[in-house]
Amino acid sequence: MERLIELFRRKIAVTSLDFVRSMEQTIPWDARLVGLRGARGIGKTTLFLQHIKKHFEHDLSKVLYVSLDNLWFTEHSLLELADTFYKQGGTHLFLDEVHKYPQWSVAVKNLYDDYPELHIAFTGSSLLEILDARADLSRRAVVFNMQGLSFREFLMLRTGKFFPLYKLQDILENHERIAQEIVSQVHPYQYFSEYQRLGYYPYFLESIDTYFIRLEETINMILEIELPQLRHIEVASIPKIKRLLGVIAESAPFIPNITKLSEHVGIHRHTVLAYLQALHEAKLIYALYRNAHGIGALQKPEKIYLENTNLMYLLKGDSVEIGTIRETFFANQVSQNHTIEYTESGDFLIDGHVTVEVGGKHKTRKQIQHIQDAYIASDNLEYGYDKKIPLWLFGFLY
């Protein structure tokens, strides 16, 4: 255990607090069991370490961070670690990569029940099943989903300036004033294309030159390790899933014909739908449904996008289509805190009542003129007017 403590202290020593994501302030860390799910590489570990450094740096004996993929756990159990830590006066245990630990949900449930004074926080893959966990952690855990960097957060990192986040309704009603406040400090379009290309994952902070190499490694880890481990997909099927992802990338926004798709990839129709659902949960694609409530495993999405614009540039290079970039950016930023559904009128239906059409600066309201609660998210605009809102402003929602 001394080795784990040494590794933890070393990580804390090099953890920077220069930029801490806003999400750190919204999580109820005092809850006894907190879960943080998210795709690989978006900063879950960093958020944990930053929170610890902010609140425990002057008394690290009370807290311990461990990654459950550490080799220490090949010969020792999580229960053994927690018991020793608790008896030594520990109060807060942070567990990273819980899905790497066999029967993790049962182990965490036992810790929760047997050590009532111990606060536990854990991170896991976006594929992590909380509601269906065998130990029924849904009644015990407060679980949050973590997204990659918003455009707002990227701007703060690139400029060193602070920008507040805004509620969707505030943007819809007061976008002219909000845009004025932001543009008085920075010209967003100076950084917008850079963000769309390589600003969603924090890898750019280490090296821009190796950004897409790191991103490709992340995708392969999700497909080759997490899908088989967490969705019990046979390793032999991974090449077909990669082919499926390639087809989607080539044609996004992809309007799926499941029969033709199953023939092209060489798998059964039901298997195609199951793979699409898995890719959606793994945060590699964004599946847009006509009714987002009660999505079933065999429900066909109406449209499929890649999950974020960085993935588009990785998989398609410079042949990306600007209209798809715009729609992908909008869906990615808004879906963090809102429900997005397919609609016949416009591009997206938000929270069941707000219709949005996404386009360039000359986009008109022709397609949505008969809808009262409808807006245009327009690219290449610094300022909007009336119900025409700058597209970049939807990157300030989180």
Image (cartoon, helix red, strand yellow):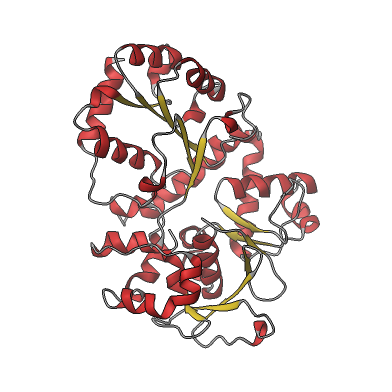
Comparing 251 with 64, the one in front is 64
- Across and down, in percent, residue 211 comes to 36, 54
Q: Residue at x 47, y 85 (%)?
A: 385
Q: Quadrant of the N terminus?
A: top left
- Is residue 139 rendered to the left or right of residue 263? left
Residue 268 appears in view: no
Q: Quadrant of the C terminus?
A: bottom left
Comparing 85 with 114, the one in front is 114
- Is residue 96 rendered to the left or right of residue 267? left
- Is residue 40 rendered to the left or right of residue 270? left
Q: Is residue 274 above or below residue 85?
A: below
- The picture quadrant where one finds residue 75 is top left
Q: Residue at x 48, y 78 (%)?
A: 389
Q: Residue at x 43, y 72 (%)?
A: 392
- Across and down, in percent, residue 397 comes to 45, 62
- Across and down, in percent, residue 151 comes to 39, 63
Residue 56 appears in view: yes
Q: How many marks?
A: 0
Q: Residue at x 39, y 34 (%)?
A: 30
Comparing 352 with 5, the one in front is 352
- Across and down, in percent, residue 271 comes to 75, 44
Q: Is residue 158 above or below residue 61?
A: below
- Is residue 52 rendered to the left or right of residue 351? left
